[in-house]
Amino acid sequence: MDDMFEKGRRKRSQVMGAEFVERALGGPPDAFGADFQRFLTEYAWGAVWGRGNLTDRERHMITLGILAALGREKELEGHIRATANTGVSERDLSDVLHQVAVYAGVPAGLSALNTARRVFAQRDGEG
Protein backbone atom coordinates (compact mmCIF):
# COMPACT_ATOMS: atom_id res chain seq x y z
CA MET A 1 0.00 0.00 0.00
CA ASP A 2 2.91 2.40 0.51
CA ASP A 3 3.53 2.27 -3.26
CA MET A 4 -0.13 3.09 -3.94
CA PHE A 5 -0.01 5.90 -1.38
CA GLU A 6 3.07 7.44 -3.00
CA LYS A 7 1.56 7.04 -6.47
CA GLY A 8 -1.60 8.72 -5.21
CA ARG A 9 0.30 11.48 -3.47
CA ARG A 10 2.18 12.31 -6.66
CA LYS A 11 -0.99 12.31 -8.77
CA ARG A 12 -2.97 14.30 -6.19
CA SER A 13 -0.17 16.89 -6.00
CA GLN A 14 0.02 17.08 -9.79
CA VAL A 15 -3.72 17.69 -10.13
CA MET A 16 -4.68 19.62 -6.99
CA GLY A 17 -1.34 21.29 -6.24
CA ALA A 18 1.36 20.48 -3.73
CA GLU A 19 0.19 23.06 -1.16
CA PHE A 20 -3.33 21.61 -1.14
CA VAL A 21 -1.98 18.09 -0.60
CA GLU A 22 0.41 19.17 2.13
CA ARG A 23 -2.49 20.79 4.01
CA ALA A 24 -4.66 17.70 3.53
CA LEU A 25 -1.97 15.28 4.65
CA GLY A 26 -0.29 17.53 7.23
CA GLY A 27 -0.44 16.88 10.92
CA PRO A 28 0.24 13.83 13.01
CA PRO A 29 -0.50 10.45 11.40
CA ASP A 30 -2.78 9.52 14.32
CA ALA A 31 -4.89 12.73 14.13
CA PHE A 32 -8.60 12.36 13.50
CA GLY A 33 -9.13 12.10 9.74
CA ALA A 34 -5.53 11.27 8.88
CA ASP A 35 -6.48 7.69 8.01
CA PHE A 36 -9.29 9.02 5.80
CA GLN A 37 -6.85 11.24 3.90
CA ARG A 38 -4.54 8.25 3.45
CA PHE A 39 -7.49 6.20 2.16
CA LEU A 40 -8.43 8.94 -0.34
CA THR A 41 -4.85 9.30 -1.49
CA GLU A 42 -4.36 5.55 -2.01
CA TYR A 43 -7.66 4.72 -3.65
CA ALA A 44 -9.07 7.85 -5.29
CA TRP A 45 -5.73 9.24 -6.43
CA GLY A 46 -3.49 6.17 -6.66
CA ALA A 47 -5.87 3.46 -7.85
CA VAL A 48 -8.46 5.51 -9.78
CA TRP A 49 -6.73 8.68 -11.01
CA GLY A 50 -3.61 6.54 -11.52
CA ARG A 51 -5.30 4.19 -13.99
CA GLY A 52 -4.37 4.33 -17.64
CA ASN A 53 -6.45 5.09 -20.75
CA LEU A 54 -8.02 8.41 -19.71
CA THR A 55 -5.90 11.54 -19.62
CA ASP A 56 -5.93 13.72 -16.52
CA ARG A 57 -7.88 16.30 -18.55
CA GLU A 58 -10.56 13.75 -19.46
CA ARG A 59 -10.71 12.33 -15.94
CA HIS A 60 -10.95 15.83 -14.51
CA MET A 61 -13.88 16.77 -16.76
CA ILE A 62 -15.70 13.63 -15.62
CA THR A 63 -14.97 14.50 -11.99
CA LEU A 64 -16.20 18.07 -12.47
CA GLY A 65 -19.43 16.82 -14.04
CA ILE A 66 -20.08 14.33 -11.26
CA LEU A 67 -19.39 16.86 -8.49
CA ALA A 68 -21.64 19.41 -10.21
CA ALA A 69 -24.44 16.88 -10.74
CA LEU A 70 -24.29 15.84 -7.08
CA GLY A 71 -24.18 19.43 -5.84
CA ARG A 72 -20.87 18.98 -4.04
CA GLU A 73 -19.95 22.66 -4.24
CA LYS A 74 -16.99 22.67 -1.83
CA GLU A 75 -15.25 19.83 -3.67
CA LEU A 76 -16.27 21.31 -7.03
CA GLU A 77 -14.69 24.61 -6.05
CA GLY A 78 -11.35 22.93 -5.34
CA HIS A 79 -11.46 21.01 -8.59
CA ILE A 80 -12.33 24.13 -10.58
CA ARG A 81 -9.23 25.79 -9.11
CA ALA A 82 -7.21 22.76 -10.19
CA THR A 83 -8.31 22.92 -13.84
CA ALA A 84 -5.19 24.95 -14.60
CA ASN A 85 -3.16 21.86 -13.70
CA THR A 86 -4.99 19.48 -16.03
CA GLY A 87 -5.61 21.57 -19.13
CA VAL A 88 -9.37 21.92 -18.61
CA SER A 89 -10.23 25.30 -20.11
CA GLU A 90 -13.10 27.57 -19.14
CA ARG A 91 -14.79 26.53 -22.40
CA ASP A 92 -14.35 22.84 -21.48
CA LEU A 93 -15.92 23.50 -18.09
CA SER A 94 -18.78 25.40 -19.71
CA ASP A 95 -19.44 22.41 -21.97
CA VAL A 96 -19.36 20.06 -18.97
CA LEU A 97 -21.87 22.24 -17.13
CA HIS A 98 -24.18 22.27 -20.14
CA GLN A 99 -24.12 18.45 -20.01
CA VAL A 100 -24.87 18.58 -16.29
CA ALA A 101 -27.84 20.90 -16.86
CA VAL A 102 -29.32 18.56 -19.48
CA TYR A 103 -28.73 15.26 -17.67
CA ALA A 104 -28.80 16.21 -13.97
CA GLY A 105 -31.05 19.26 -14.07
CA VAL A 106 -30.80 22.98 -14.65
CA PRO A 107 -30.54 23.82 -10.91
CA ALA A 108 -27.44 21.61 -10.58
CA GLY A 109 -25.88 23.15 -13.69
CA LEU A 110 -26.70 26.70 -12.60
CA SER A 111 -25.35 26.14 -9.10
CA ALA A 112 -22.10 24.79 -10.56
CA LEU A 113 -21.92 27.72 -13.00
CA ASN A 114 -22.22 30.14 -10.08
CA THR A 115 -19.47 28.26 -8.22
CA ALA A 116 -17.24 28.50 -11.29
CA ARG A 117 -17.93 32.23 -11.65
CA ARG A 118 -16.95 32.75 -8.01
CA VAL A 119 -13.72 30.74 -8.40
CA PHE A 120 -12.78 32.55 -11.63
CA ALA A 121 -13.48 35.95 -10.03
CA GLN A 122 -11.24 35.06 -7.06
CA ARG A 123 -8.55 33.80 -9.40
CA ASP A 124 -8.72 36.94 -11.51
CA GLY A 125 -8.61 39.18 -8.43
CA GLU A 126 -12.19 40.36 -8.76
CA GLY A 127 -13.56 38.70 -5.64
Image (tube, rainbow, N blue to C red):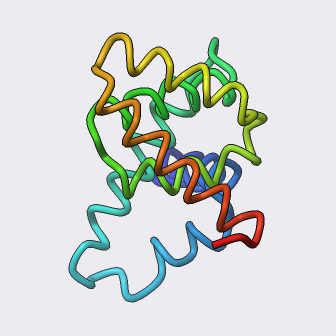
Residue 41 as seen in the image, left or right of residue 14: left
Which residue corresponds to the image point at 21% horizontal and 80% vertical from the top-left? 32
Q: Quadrant of the C terminus?
A: bottom right
In this view, the residue in front, 119 or 76, is 119
Q: Quadrant of residue 36?
A: bottom left
Residue 59 as seen in the image, left or right of residue 28: right
Which residue corresponds to the image point at 37% horizontal and 29% vertical from the top-left? 66
Residue 13's place in the image compared with 68, above or below, is below
In this view, the residue in front, 57 or 25, is 57
- Percent position (x, y) of residue 40? 37, 51
- Percent position (x, y) of residue 67? 37, 37
Residue 107 as seen in the image, left or right of residue 112: left
- Percent position (x, y) of residue 61? 57, 27
In this view, the residue in front, 63 or 119, is 119
Q: Quadrant of residue 31?
A: bottom left
Which residue corresponds to the image point at 38% horizontal and 20% vertical from the top-left? 101
Q: Quadrant of residue 106?
A: top left
- Percent position (x, y) of residue 55? 69, 22
Residue 29's place in the image compared with 73, above or below, is below
